[in-house]
Amino acid sequence: MASVKPSAPERGLVFRIGAVLSDPAWRLTWRNVFLPVYCKACDMRLLTEENGFFCPDCWHKAPWIDPPYCPLCGKPHDRMVGLGNAPNFPCAGCRERPAKHITRILAAARYDGVVKQAVRLFKFQGKRKLAEPLAEAMRAHVEREGGPAAAYDLLIPVPLHRVRLRERGFNQSLLLLQELLPLCPGAKVDESLQRIRPTVAQSTLKAEERAANVRGAFAVVGDTVKGRIVLMVDDVVTTGGTVGECARVLRRAGAARVDVLSAALARPGMRLDW
Ligand SMILES: [Zn+2]
Ligand SMILES: [Zn+2]
């Protein structure tokens, strides 16, 4: 059977439809119509691409950490004791037992509510696009601090063991770190910190077992960290534990200072359900 060639006007129409479908603004409209997306927290229809998982209202109500919080471990102070808008000051725990190897931990939110939901979608369901809003919150938190970002020489992700990396397909800390590069334009990405033995998920262990679980699990390859000011990036930090051991190894390898920036801060002893 002879094929029927489209006439010139028909070709023009196809071209115009193609142009409309590929235009970014229209693409968003089509997606909203045919592939509606709903907020993972409140089920409201999402109509913008700002954060394709949570509506602005739910994201705004996330447990973001605002002053006053501890400038050493990042833990927010309890507002119920009438602190109001007091400036940041060290918590009792840090005054009594200052961290040995970490100078400070900066955390954007408590590991709770939509942030907990976001981290879990990001990490366990492979929703890599969530690196953007999570890193954006981390960046805003650091900028509120008045710019310690300029001091960092190296950005180091908390590493995954290669077996875990193969299973997951990505290191969530490295994805966050890559989104944070514009924050520290003078800093280099460094992956010389490696996880040399697999560890049991910290969340499954009691507080006293956690230090033993991660002890000796990390090593630094080469000497790039020597004399450098390091910002280590993680998705969820439980005070001490993994980042404490990473910082110990980095300092032993000669790092001048190790700070930690994390999307979320879990309470000590909190079960993280993973
Ligand atoms: Zn919502
Ligand atoms: Zn503290």
Image (cartoon, grey):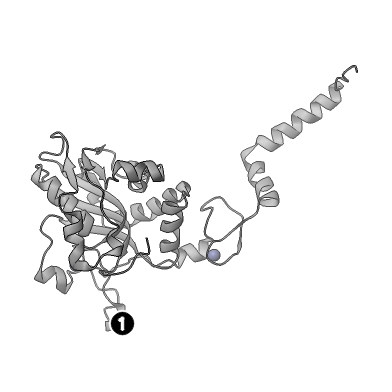
Vertical position of residue 49 compared to residue 55: above or below: above
Label 1: how many Cα within 10 Å (few below 14, some 14–19, many 20+): few
Taking 64 as reference, is 214 left or right?
Answer: left
Residue 42 in the image: x percent, y percent?
Answer: 56, 67
Regarding residue 200, the answer to whether it shows in the image is: yes
Write the residue at 30% across / 55% down: 262
Res 174 visible: no
What secondary structure is marked by label 1?
helix
Horizontal arrangement in the rendering, residue 69 relative to residue 254 (left or right): right
Question: Is 24 on the left-hand or right-hand side of 193?
Answer: right
Residue 30 percent across, percent down from the top left: 69, 46
The residue furthest bottom is 81
Residue 68 or residue 102, whichever sits in front: 102
Instruction: Give amino acid for label 1.
Output: Met
Given residues 217 and 12, the one toward you in this image is: 217
Assign the C terminus to one quadrant of the image. bottom left
Q: Residue furthest top?
A: 2
Q: Quadrant of residue 156?
A: top left
* Screen quadrant of the N terminus: top right
Q: Residue at x 45, y 51 (%)?
A: 130
Q: Is residue 213 left or right of residue 128?
A: left
The quadrant holding residue 43 is bottom right
Across and down, in percent, residue 253 comes to 10, 42
Q: Position of residue 129 (x, y in %)?
A: 47, 47
The residue under label 1 is 80
In the depicted view, which residue is nearer to us: 166 or 247? 166
Q: How many marks?
A: 1
Within 8 Å of ligand 2, the CB of disc 1? no
248 up-or-down from 162: above or below: below
Q: Is residue 8 above or below residue 201?
A: above
